[in-house]
Image (cartoon, rainbow, N blue to C red):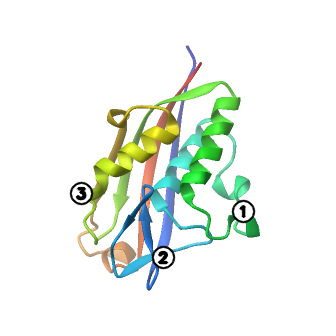
Amino acid sequence: MSFRIGSGVDFHKLAEGRELWIGGVQIPHYKGAVGHSDADVLLHAICDALLGALSLGDIGVHFPDTEAAYKGIDSKILLQKTIQLVAERGYRVINVDSTLCLEKPKIKPYVTQMQAIIAEILSITAADVSVKATTTEQMGFAGREEGLMAYATVLLQRV
């Protein structure tokens, strides 16, 4: 059996008056992520991990922020398109491990919903999707609530 491991990371600036989408879930907060798409930092990190596992570049190569078609796009669509690329190359996802870094809001109430959304798109079980969060103890841009970041690792197996 052939296995591939990929890691991804994404960062987005936070600004007042924007929607906050994380893991495919809209989270009520006075700040939201800024980006060309809906700026879902978690789904972007997972996309990069999937693409990286197969040496396919990164999310910017496949969904450039210079393309009007991706302006405001739902990142669940980007994840669906990314998993299609993975499947076309004969691989399937075994599991996802991810970590969000943000001071606020607390995401624990939304983790189960995030896991279900991600699992459905990737055709795995929610138990195969780990979503964790940490603060930076008020240090750096995440600690000052200027931005947020996400890390993701995926394991793929040749079908």
Instruction: Kindly report the distance in space between the C-alpha atoms of the residues bearing marks 3 and 2.
Output: 21 Å
Please say if the residues under marks 3 and 2 sit with CB atoms less than 8 Å apart.
Answer: no
* Residue beneath the point at 43% across and 76% down: 32
* Residue beneath the point at 57% across and 48% down: 79
Frontmost residue, 43 versus 48:
43
* Residue at which label 2 appears: 13
Q: Earlier in the sequence, mark 1 or mark 3?
A: 1
Instruction: Kindly report the distance in space between the C-alpha atoms of the residues bearing marks 2 and 1.
Output: 18 Å
Seen in the image, is 68 located left or right of residue 44? Answer: right
Q: Earlier in the sequence, mark 2 or mark 1?
A: 2
Mark 1 burial class by Cα count in 10 Å: few <14, some 14-19, many 20+: some
**Image depth: mark 3 or mark 2 in front:** 3
Name the amino acid, label 2.
Lys
Seen in the image, is 38 located left or right of residue 111? Answer: right
> Residue 151: image x %, image y %?
43, 53
* Residue at which label 3 appears: 108
- The answer to whether residue 73 is above or below residue 125 is below
* Residue at which label 1 appears: 64
Seen in the image, is 152 located left or right of residue 133? Answer: right
> Residue 145: image x %, image y %?
35, 78
Name the amino acid, label 1.
Pro
Please say if the residues under marks 2 and 1 sit with CB atoms less than 8 Å apart.
Answer: no
